[in-house]
């Protein structure tokens, strides 16, 4: 599904190659972008979802993917503990 198609948009932030963080659309193999910092990847993913209603950002960590809480979408630049 592309950004111009119907349906909810799901953007995933996950560890990539060489210690970078990849931002990709769910179901796509090629990342949309890669970042050195996790916070920059969060910010980019959140910006992508602002143009689509019901869009979601999923963050991958040691336990798998989890949705980014709505109240945290504006606090992307805070490091996670």
Image (tube, grey):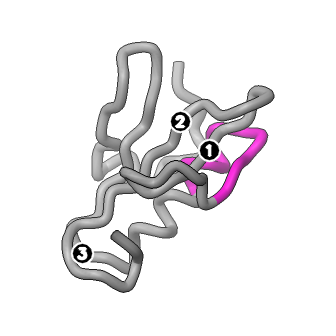
Binning the other alpha carbons within 10 Å of mark 2 as few (below 14), some (14 to 19) or many (20 upward) gives many
Q: x and y percent of residue 12 in the render?
A: 44, 46
In the rendered image, the vertical position of residue 26 relative to residue 66, given as above or below: below
Q: Label 2 near label 1: C-beta < 8 Å?
A: yes
Give the residue number, with chain letter if any, for mark 1: 22
In the rendered image, the vertical position of residue 64 relative to residue 8, given as above or below: above
Q: x and y percent of residue 78 in the render?
A: 57, 38
The one nearer the camera, 24 or 41, is: 24
Residue 54 bears which disc, if any? none
Left or right relative to 56: residue 16: right
Binning the other alpha carbons within 10 Å of mark 1 as few (below 14), some (14 to 19) or many (20 upward) gives many
The one nearer the camera, 64 or 40, is: 64
Residue shown at 46% from the left, 54% from the top = 28
The segment highlighted magenta reads 33-43
Counting residues from the N terminus, which is met first, the one under dot 1 or under dot 2? 2
Give the residue number, with chain letter if any, for mark 3: 53
Left or right relative to 31: residue 71: left
Residue shown at 53% from the left, 26% from the top = 80
Number of the front mark, 1 or 3? 1
Residue shown at 32% from the left, 76% from the top = 52
Q: x and y percent of residue 75 in the render?
A: 49, 48
* Secondary structure type for disc 1: strand
Residue shown at 29% from the left, 52% from the top = 70
Give the residue number, with chain letter if any, for mark 2: 14
């Amino acid at each position: 599904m592309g950004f111009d198609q119907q349906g909810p948009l799901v953007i995933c932030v996950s560890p990539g190659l060489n210690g970078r963080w990849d931002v990709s659309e769910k179901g796509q193999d090629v990342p949309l972008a890669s970042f050195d910092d996790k916070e920059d990847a969060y910010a980019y993913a959140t910006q992508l979802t602002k143009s689509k209603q019901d869009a979601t950002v999923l963050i991958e960590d040691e336990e798998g993917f989890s949705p980014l809480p709505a109240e945290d979408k504006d606090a992307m630049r805070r490091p996670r503990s």
